[in-house]
Image (cartoon, rainbow, N blue to C red):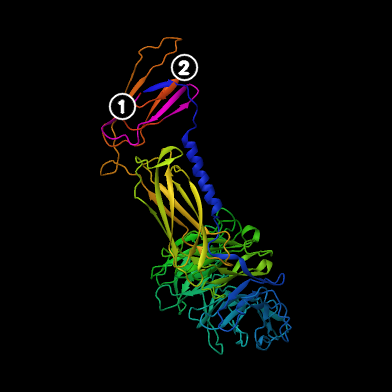
Amino acid sequence: MIILNRFSYLSPKKTYYQFMCWLTILLLYLFYPLSAFNIDTKHARVYSGKTETYFGYSVGLAHLTSATNNVLIGAPKDNYDLCKNSDFSKTGVIFSCSSTTDDSCSKFCVHNLESILDRDIQNVSNAWLGVNIDINPRKEEFVTCGHRWKSVFVDDQYVKTFYMKGFCVVTTLNGSKSRRPLLMKSDKITAGGTSLKYTQDGQKIIVGVLGRDKYPGGIILFPNVEPNPDGKPMLLSSNIDNNYAGYAVASGKFFNNKYEYYVMGVPRNGSGAVLIIDETNHIVQRLQSESKEIGSYFGMKLCVADVNKDGLDDLLVGAPMEPGQLREEGQVIVYLSDGKKLQKKLVLFGDKEEGARFGSTMTLIGDIDQDGFIDIAIGAPYENNQEGAIYIYNTNKEGLPSTYSQKITGKDAAMGKDMKGFGISISDSVDVNNDSCPDFLVGAYLSNQVRLLFSRPVLDLNLELLPESQKINFAEYNCPNHGNKAVCFKVKLKFSYVQNNQIPPKIDLEGQLATGSQSQMNLSRSVQSFGFKLETGKKLEKEFHIIVKEHPNIFQPIHITIQMALAKNATCKICPILRTKTVLKKIPFELECGDDDKCTTDLKVSASTTLKYLLYQKEEKFDIKVVVSNGNNHAYNSFATFVFPKYLQYIQAIKYKVQPDFECSTDSSAEEDMVRCTLGNPLPKNTDSNLL
């Protein structure tokens, strides 16, 4: 029975649900910052050089068995004024530093540099020695170049002509021995040593050389033996000049695991190109830039890596000058090998900031997240007004993802110093502190700074969320809720972890449980925080009691989400990072809708009143009897709505005959009032709901 009466206004529940949903999202955002993965920036090692020396333009990190001075830093505009008997001017300098102490650098004097270079026929001043560094993967030695070294030619009139041919030096990591320079003797080249790279077995040194006059340049291949033999020029036969062939070099086993192919970047060939050549100087494959812009510098940087772990090397090509929506955003194009050729797979963009020159540097930094797959760092040294940044990409069984896992800006690693050009150089990785986690160097040459960044150990949590039942029976009111009947259920969280040498035996964790459905929040407490201490080898359990309130959409499952994090008061110096942070469980409602779980109802409504006429200006009470019948599957979330004019007042609704429970609520507008009554949840098949 419905008896009309005056009522109080109740705001729509939808507004409340939306508010609670956004509140939950906000709480989760505040609780879990959307920042780093596992490269630590708060405890970086700091190395500083003299101003305007480009200290950090190149970096190298070596694995030494008997010494700690395994950090090499190039400062190509510094001077060897402290080396014995040196009168060269701004030759460029290599610094040797300790990986255990800040600012522990000393100039690395290339052994017998004065005796192996003849001042009468060579000019080493402003040679930019240290413009690049590469460490032999198989021996304790490294190679560095000075691509602006000049040879001197004196004609019959005693007129000197300088040819900027460049040179490279191979030396032991402890500085005890240096071989004679790798000299570029061809008259067709200039700036020898613009780029360099050891082959993967360390038996050869690939040196990039640019073309002189009408010659296009290429590479010179030096066997890594003593005494240094002359290099084998592998120059392009094209007569296109100034294409900068050899600006970047690399090598890889792209098409089988036996033969190593050589790669050279040709960044000024229109919008750029990359050439794959074999031992006979035959071009096996040419990768052409697809950019519509001239000057993208496609091929300026190269990185070889087996990103999908299929046993064949793949290739990343940097195009740091490529414009996107903004000038010089930069991009990296990824090519995967199918065993016959390299195929374009995807393009990486960083954050697409103007002038960032994303892709200026690319380096393999080992398996920093300890998942069995290599990871890659890409530099954008001019991002954010030349502050610079590096982007970390974690490969996985699917290959290289298009999104980065962590971005580290110059500000993040500043440690109280000014940072400019951060990301111009990135070293290969070495575990320098014996925690089984790879570490690497990043240079910021415009502020003459270098940072040794340590990767944090990764903690894999075993999380399991178990509800006491697989479905929720919403018709079973099994617990009180502030004096009202409610539906309750329990979920149990089980967690443990496997301890290793990098993970502390005891860890303080904190978490949050969030509840809701896809469209609305409908549980008594949407967010609940908790904390606990987890010990290695022990399995812990925590039980949560959840109350379902209001009137949820039972066609959508309840979402139970657990978010985990290290406790804010954790005492470890370099704490582990959680890989498994979230577990989600969807619990559906129990429905009685047939084998197909689809509810097909057949609702019919009829109404009658105890009063046929209303007398004008006479106050009267009357009843309305409403019968809703269901002739098919159970009807869930069904309700009846009554709309009436303002001059009628709703009094109450009472149960008529034996029927499912119902609730009524009121609403109002400027012209009319409304009463909405539930019809039982569910209204069973072949059942009537009688309202009086």
Residue found 50% across the figure and 83% down from its top: 203
Q: Which residue is mark 1?
A: 657
The x, y position of residue 224, in whole percent, is 53, 85
How many other residues sit within 10 Å of disc 2, few (<14), some (14-19) or many (≥20)? few
Q: Which residue is mark 2?
A: 647
Asked whether 391 or 663 is in front, the reply is 663
Check the picture and name the quadrant holding the C terminus. Answer: top left
The x, y position of residue 648, in whole percent, is 44, 18
Q: How many marks?
A: 2
The region drawn magenta spans 664-691
Q: Secondary structure at mark 1?
A: loop
Q: Secondary structure at mark 2?
A: loop
Check the picture and name the quadrant holding the N terminus. Answer: top left
Residue found 33% across the figure and 44% down from its top: 590
Would you place residue 527 above or below residue 452 in this image?
above
What residue type is disc 2 on? Tyr
Magenta span includes 671: yes
The x, y position of residue 225, in whole percent, is 53, 87
Magenta span includes 567: no
Residue 508 visible in the picture: yes
Asked whether 468 or 612 is in front, the reply is 468
- Would you identify the image quadrant in which residue 147 lies? bottom right
Characterize the magenta stretch by its predominant secondary structure.
strand
Would you place residue 166 above or below residue 240 in this image?
below
Would you place residue 175 above or below residue 581 in this image?
below
Mark 2 and mark 1 residues within 8 Å of each other at the beta carbon: no
Chain-order first, disc 2 or disc 1: 2
What residue type is disc 1 on? Lys
